[in-house]
Image (cartoon, coloured by chain):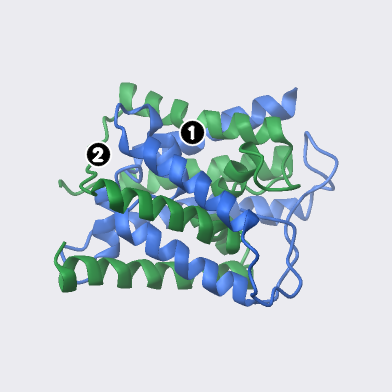
Chain colours: A green, B blue
């Protein structure tokens, strides 16, 4: 995998932050993707109105498609097997609902407003993910 | 109507940012999480870039009485830790580390001609449903309005 220029990485990050800022100042909502997904699928209760959640989520692949088509084609590397994808999806869905957030809601929005819950959640899921990768790649050798 | 349009545009910008920064590439995410391997710092740069405008927006919020297209801000005020948060974040981290997908990148990756994001997102929604219906015996304390 070729290294990505830090300038492009920060630019992409700024776009994510601008989107989260927009959603807060215009819609008054936290741009947390797992929560919006739960609302859109009618699994979560309350929070962002259904149509706003659906439109935000609809925008995600449109934005990715536009960048892939006009700016930079991302090189996607998914090496995971079918059972691993199933297990990972279930764990991510279950865990993000239990913790009320994921990388966007806790990791970006929560950290940006220095929420103690989000800072703790971010530290925990980062550590948990690092340990998981270490076990999978360097101990099991998968 | 305006709130629907701004939600769509915010989503487009968010997804564009994830694609531009290569965060929709699980290989790139795993390379960041693999501290004992060929470590790739990209995710840290992305996080730093994302936190800056968001922090400015939260500072601005204190000067603006209400959002432009809504009556009030809906920001969780819960500041207390509980076991749901700790256990949930741990489980999420395991799933994230197994494949390198978290919710935003997986949904953004649905249009790239791959089948893996579709399976992942379907299983993620199933996991959310299971959390919803499973009677958990974790002491919950005061849970804030569901954030995300």
**Residue B52 in the image: above or below residue B22:** below
- Residue corresponding to mark 1: A60
Which SS class for mark 1? Answer: helix
For label 2, count other residues whose C-alpha is less than 10 Å away and answer few (under 14), some (14-19) or many (20+).
some
Q: Answer left or right for B32 relative to A127.
A: left
Q: Residue at x 39, y 24 (%)?
A: A66
Disc 1 is attached to a residue of which chain? Answer: A
Which SS class for mark 2? Answer: loop
**Residue A125 in the image: above or below residue A92:** below
Q: Nearer the viewer, residue B32 or B57?
A: B32
Asked whether residue B44 is in view, the answer is no
**Residue B12 in the image: above or below residue B58:** above
Asked whether residue B103 is in view, the answer is yes
Q: Earlier in the sequence, mark 2 or mark 1?
A: 1
Snapshot quadrant of residue B68:
top right
Which of the numbered marks, if any, corresponds to residue A76? 2
Kindly indicate whether the residues beneath marks 2 and 1 are on one polypeptide chain: yes
CA distance for labels 2 and 1: 16 Å
């Amino acid at each position: 995998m070729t290294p990505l220029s830090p300038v492009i990485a920060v630019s992409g990050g700024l776009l994510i932050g601008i989107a989260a800022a927009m959603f807060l100042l215009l819609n008054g909502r936290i741009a947390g993707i797992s929560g919006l997904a739960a609302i859109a699928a009618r699994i979560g209760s309350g929070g962002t109105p259904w149509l706003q959640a659906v439109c935000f989520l609809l925008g995600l692949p449109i934005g990715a498609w536009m960048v892939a088509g006009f700016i930079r084609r991302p090189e996607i590397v998914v090496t995971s097997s079918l059972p691993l994808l199933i297990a990972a999806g279930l764990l991510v869905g279950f865990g993000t609902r239990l913790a009320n957030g994921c990388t966007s809601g806790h990791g970006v929005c929560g950290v940006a407003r220095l929420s103690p819950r989000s800072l703790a959640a971010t530290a925990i899921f980062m550590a948990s993910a690092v340990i998981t990768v270490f076990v999978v790649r360097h101990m099991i050798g998968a | 109507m305006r709130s629907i349009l701004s939600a769509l545009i915010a989503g487009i910008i968010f997804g564009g940012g994830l694609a531009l920064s290569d965060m929709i590439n699980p290989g790139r995410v795993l390379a960041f999480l693999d501290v004992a391997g060929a470590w790739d710092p990209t995710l840290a740069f992305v996080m730093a870039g994302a936190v800056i405008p968001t922090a400015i927006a939260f500072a601005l919020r204190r000067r603006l009485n209400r959002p432009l297209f809504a009556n009030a801000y809906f920001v969780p005020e819960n500041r207390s830790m509980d076991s749901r948060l700790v256990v949930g974040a741990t489980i999420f981290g395991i799933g994230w580390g197994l494949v390198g997908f978290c919710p935003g990148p997986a949904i953004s990756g649905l249009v790239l001609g791959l089948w893996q994001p579709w399976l992942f997102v379907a299983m993620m929604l199933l996991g959310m449903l299971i959390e919803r219906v499973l009677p958990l015996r974790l002491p919950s304390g005061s849970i804030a309005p569901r954030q995300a």
